[in-house]
Image (cartoon, rainbow, N blue to C red):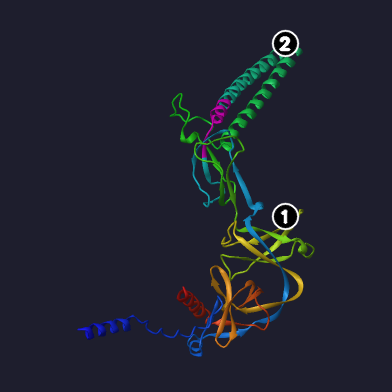
Amino acid sequence: MRYLCLAGMLMLAGCSKEAPKPEPAKAEEKRAPGEVQLDAAMVKSGNIVSVTVETRSQPAVLRANGRLTVNEERTWHVDSLVDGRVLQLLVNVGDRVSAGQVVAKMHSHEVHEARSEYQRAKTDLAKAQSQRSFAERTRDRVKRLYDLKAASLEQTEHAESQLRDAVSAVKNAEIELERTRVHLVEFLDVSADDHPDHKPGEFIHEEDLVPVKSRNGGVVTKRDTSVGAVLKAADLVLEVSDLSAVWMIAALPEEYLGKVKTGMTAAVHVQAYPDEVFSGKIARLGDQLDAETRTVPVRIVLANPGQRLRPEMYAVAEIAAGGAAEALFVPQSALQDLNGQAVVFLDQGGGKYAVRPVRTGRIQGANVEVLEGLAAGERVVSRGGFVLKSQMFKSSLAEE
């Protein structure tokens, strides 16, 4: 029994000894963030091709950032004609309107006041015409009496004078009637006479509302009122712009001012159409320098026949400054997007690739200018960059 206990104790003692630890695996070679290591087979299967960054001689250009705006020379205000209240607004911002189109309707007491003046003018004209007829009959009667030696020359001349005054009064009354009619019909664009079905005390009818019309065709770019608003004459209702031509207001750095003149052409790029160039012409250089940015505003006029360019788009203008300058170019296929940043993969040899952020410039055919981030002679991946990007993300997830 003692032997059995001793054997059990030895067995327990043997179990309590620590098991030998396995030898640690050989640590992989650490890579810097943004680096990818591929073997030759992966390079081949990924169809990864590298090219050398080239230097080319290009015409020197000046770059200026800015934004697009409406062409103020082809922008018109649609104003209220009278004091009154807006009862109808028939268009919204972005709507296209034609010349003469009714865009709003207003109620105004001026309509009723103008009609009262028109009715008074009609009454005054009828009275003047009656007085002229009486003066004509009086003149004729006095003239007959004068021929019969029954009236004096003085009486005849007085009758002629009365007739001339009556004729003049009729002409003045006709002018006043026409003035009040034109104000109603042509200016306010309502009928001169009240509608026959209107009852006394009724003041608001559809045909009595003053229409607000757009004098020119274009796009509504601003609406400065709402239904129910009370406006005064000449208050802004809408703004209409012809967008077949737009302006770019570019901020030209101070050091470039001496190289730019009105009439020069500019190539304009916008983010919405990165592969297109819009040609414009410099129409005006600003007279004052911005004290904070040290730039001068430059107005560039752009044709916009398809109206794809929209006000408030960000844009970049390139202005040929004369002469030539050296520039670096890489294929557009070499560029990759990494969290909104343009990058390329630098080929470091031996299947090792590194991410390099770059700042790009002009596009020339299948190539793009590199303003910052690369040097001539370096090699970048022109095909297969997406494979490297995927491999880099896979490695980052494995490390986490």
Looking at the rendering, the stretch of residues picked out in magenta corresponds to: 105-117
Instruction: Write down the residue under mark 1.
Output: 292
Q: Residue at x 53, y 68 (%)?
A: 339
Residue in front for this viewpoint, 357 or 159: 357
Q: Quadrant of residue 129?
A: top right
Q: Is residue 106 magenta?
A: yes
- Tell me the crowding category of disc 1: few under 14, some 14 to 19, or many 20 or more residues within 10 angstroms, Cα based: few
Spot occupied by residue 199 in the image (x, y as percentages of width and height): 44, 26
Spot occupied by residue 300 in the image (x, y as percentages of width and height): 69, 60
Spot occupied by residue 146 in the image (x, y as percentages of width and height): 72, 13
Instruction: Write down the residue under mark 2.
Output: 151
Q: Is residue 393 magenta?
A: no
The amino acid marked with disc number 2 is Ala
The amino acid marked with disc number 1 is Glu
Secondary structure category for the residue under label 1: loop
On screen, residue 19 versus residue 234, left or right, reads left
Residue in front for this viewpoint, 166 or 15: 15
Q: Residue at x 44, y 28 (%)?
A: 198
Residue in front for this viewpoint, 109 or 254: 254
